[in-house]
Image: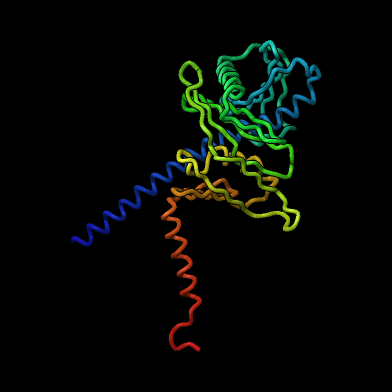
Amino acid sequence: MKHILIVLVVLLSFSVKAQNTEKLSKEINDEGIALYRSEMASWNGTDIFIENYKNRENIGGYFSYLDKDIPKCIFFSKDEKVIGTISFPANYNPKDAKLDLNERDFTLQETEYFTIRQNALKKIKNDTIFTVYKDTSFNIVPLIRNKVSKVYVLTGHSDGNVVVFGNDYLITFDHNNEVKNVEKLHNSMIVQKINDEKTGQTVSGVHSHVIENWQTITPTDICTLMLYQNFTGWEGYTTVSKKFVSIWNSNNNLVIMKTENFKSMSENILKNKKDKSQPEKGEQ
């Protein structure tokens, strides 16, 4: 009876741990997908707007958001009027996008996004935590989910053959949309080539995380992987840290495991392979 109880306790403990990492995986993946949907609207929306709007000096900026699950990219003027609205279908096909160049005021929802975007921009200009590297620029991505206002800051590179992970930041806001906290999500900038000159296209990638509060794959990692998926052809991607191993695949499935569990599983797999490769006694 005692042994049965011990086994039950171990199984229950493992189940709870698995549920915790599954919940964490879902939260991070959902946030990453929301970031991707915003950035995808911005990528395509910028091209469409610039092609059709001729008064470039009047442009004050842009941002994207989900309006009742419809991805929208809006451009505003220097006097803070909306001068362009691009609405996208679920597939983000630019041919199916709807462009509206009528000038109008911000909606209440857009005012919230505009406010945190502008407050984030001020913080970026005045806080030394932000680093701009050569041939890069910041992409400011406001996000309001579950009544929480955030701005993610991602780094884009001018070289079309590279994917940038890291040099990204999270700015959170209080109920008055004032900056509450700023934090780095990666310790440095990681640049990975899409096509290697010697080996051609790779099938996967990996990088490590060392910041204590961001030991798992980040929502910005998920967003970047989704944005560049059609260019990289990566079938999977892994981030490793002292606490977690996060494994993403091209179907956008995410699995997060504790590092010790991952190591134990890997050792068992290797042991089983080794055992199978050894001839049984009596075999020649």
Of all residues, the one furthest to the right in this rendering is 54
* The quadrant where residue 72 appears: top right
- Residue depicted at 26% across the width and 54% down the height: 9
Tell me residue 46's x, y (percent).
72, 27
- Residue depicted at 49% across the width and 70% down the height: 273
Of all residues, the one furthest to the front in this rendering is 128
Of all residues, the one furthest to the left in this rendering is 1
Question: In this rendering, is residue 62 above or below 137?
Answer: above
Tell me residue 30's x, y (percent).
51, 37
Decide which of 217, 46 is in the foreground and name it: 217
The quarter of the rendered structure image containing the N terminus is bottom left
Tell me residue 69's x, y (percent).
57, 28
Question: In this rendering, is residue 101 above or below 233?
Answer: above
Question: In this rendering, is residue 245 above or below 128?
Answer: below
Q: How many marks?
A: 0
Tell me residue 87's x, y (percent).
67, 26
* The quadrant where residue 131 appears: top right
Q: How is the image coloured?
A: rainbow
- Residue depicted at 71% across the width and 25% down the height: 98
Decide which of 203, 134 is in the foreground and name it: 134
